[in-house]
Amino acid sequence: MTHQQLLRSLLAGILCAASIWQTQAAADVLDQIPDTALVYVVVNNMQQANREISAVAQQMGRPVPDLLQLVKERLGLAQGLADAGELAVVLVSRPVGNPFPVVFVRTDDYAALVSQLQPEAQGELVSRVKLAGQPALVAKKGDYAVLAAPMHSDELTQVIQSQRAVTRDEPTRAFTEQADVYAVATTAGVQLLVRQALAGLQAMKQNFGQMGPQGESVVAGLTIYEGLFQWAAEEVGQVALALHRDDTGAVFLRKRVEFRNPAPRTEEGTPADARQLLAHLPNWPYVMAGSGEFGDSTTMERWIALSMKMMRTTAGPQALTDAEVDKLVEVSRQSMKGVRSMAFTFGVPEGGGSLFSRTGIVIDVTDTDTFITGYLQAMQSMQEIFAENEQAPYRVQMAERVPIDDKQGLKIVMQVTPQTLGLAGEDFKQVYEKFFGEKGSLTLYGAPVDANRVALAYVSEERLREMLKATQTPDQTLGVDKGIQATARLLPATAQFVVFVSPGGLLQYVQQMLETVVPAAQRGQLPTIPPFPTSPPLGMAVQYDGQAVVAGLVVPAETLAALGRYIAAFGG
């Protein structure tokens, strides 16, 4: 073997060993966290995370100091800290009393780390020290220094002596292994968080309930969240979050939610089919656009049932009976029969027009005529259900076939009461009519595109005609938008739902909302929101595998840079 070959072999061996050490390091901290953990947040590599933060700041033109070095100086940790090691903050339960936090930090010299912290007393397991001038406890477990508040000496001892590590299943391990930072709420942790959230909502409802009509509006809104948390208590298991920056400079935030009673899933539509429908959406200035495939799944029935229950809570517990909710769930399920995938655009509204004036949908179905017939029958059934209940928050005023040019289309007129939205008084009339038109009537038009596609548009037949025209001119649609294409390349190809949010479109929408909400006499005082620099949209992706939902948000590097320029334009 030549010297050059030997050098290459040694280099390969070093790189391999480093790779093995990093993989083991990522797992080691979880080996030390006790199974009584409710929530834990892990920085996989403090040095690498510090570099990523600095890189993002540079992308945005907002340089930051060396945060790791700054923290070490503030805490008095010049020695003993393994910069390339992990940091974990853990919320641990105990049999009696509130949970308590502990911090795990990898150390390459535990004795040196403790000696610089002004140890007051060094016990067999736990030492009393000063951290940033404040009393603290520290103990050693494996290759980690474990820190806790002074009042938790007994609890810290139990953590150190614990032999049972937190459970880490393969899906969660795979989800978090590439993350720079990740957090996991165990099933017990989710239950605790839900209980605390429900208690907080109850307290808020009691406070706002004493403030008259305006307070009652807030209470109605809080009731929606209360229903969601109650659902989470029954259905949600472990939840994981992961934050990562890739080689392109894009930043990803992903969430994985396991279900305690997962619904099976069977495939019919495909993600590719759903994304192709973007090429049938008009290239209106958009706030949000996306597509998704549904397949023939009982999963959709659960989402429908949840949405109907939420609809009931918005107007109070007496608005819809349990029997009516069950009927609506069945009718909604029937209305989705034959749907394989769909795409939508929520466009920037026309000045002075309804906030739905540029909202369009294209649906891929097994058979156009069958779908339209079934959809109209479902809407007519809803019309009957709501007509039987005078307190119902919604009304279907019309559902019938109508001719639209040379096509046999459909027209559905819906009405939403102000009380449903928690709105009351003349101050809210403008907002209400901006959303739903005079007297709260919102019209939906639809027409077949071909044997397997249906186009829908709100407010006017003219908007539907623009939708139909777009389906025939794919080179002028959102499907060829360069920004959407750039962001789409960063999203997983297997995602069943993708959504794109335009920062510029969102700001235009906010401007219009402000002009709607603020009284006419005060609109002249409103600041004009500057346009956002041209950049790719934010991207969101959702995938359900029959056991868990994985949802992700990506901010492309170009968008981060544009955000930095936008902030600088304000003098920030």
Image (cartoon, rainbow, N blue to C red):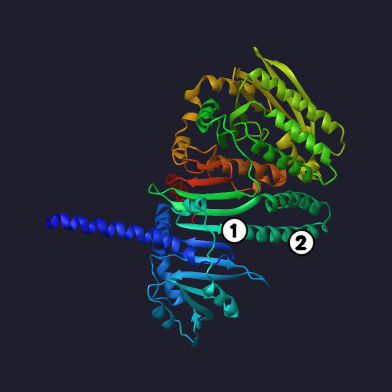
The image quarter containing residue 20 is bottom left
Which residue appears at 62% of the width and 68% of the height?
93
Relative image position of residue 161 (x, y in whole percent): 53, 74
Which residue appears at 64% of the width and 12% of the height?
406
Q: Nearer the viewer, residue 188 or 431?
A: 188
Badge 1 marks a residue whose secondary structure is loop
Picture layout, residue 152 above or below residue 185 = below
Relative image position of residue 510 (x, y in whole percent): 61, 44
Which residue corresponds to mark 1?
186
Residue at the extreme top of the image, as rendered: 406
Picture layout, residue 133 above or below residue 465 = below
Note whether residue 161 is visible: yes
The image quarter containing residue 307 is top right
Classify the position of the N terminus by image quarter.
bottom left
Residue at the extreme front of the image, as rendered: 163
Note whether residue 529 is visible: no
Badge 2 marks a residue whose secondary structure is helix
Three-letter amino acid code at disc 2? Ala
Relative image position of residue 179 (x, y in whole percent): 45, 54
Q: Nearer the viewer, residue 400 or 562?
A: 400
Q: Is residue 359 left or right of residue 426?
A: left
Which residue corresponds to mark 2?
203
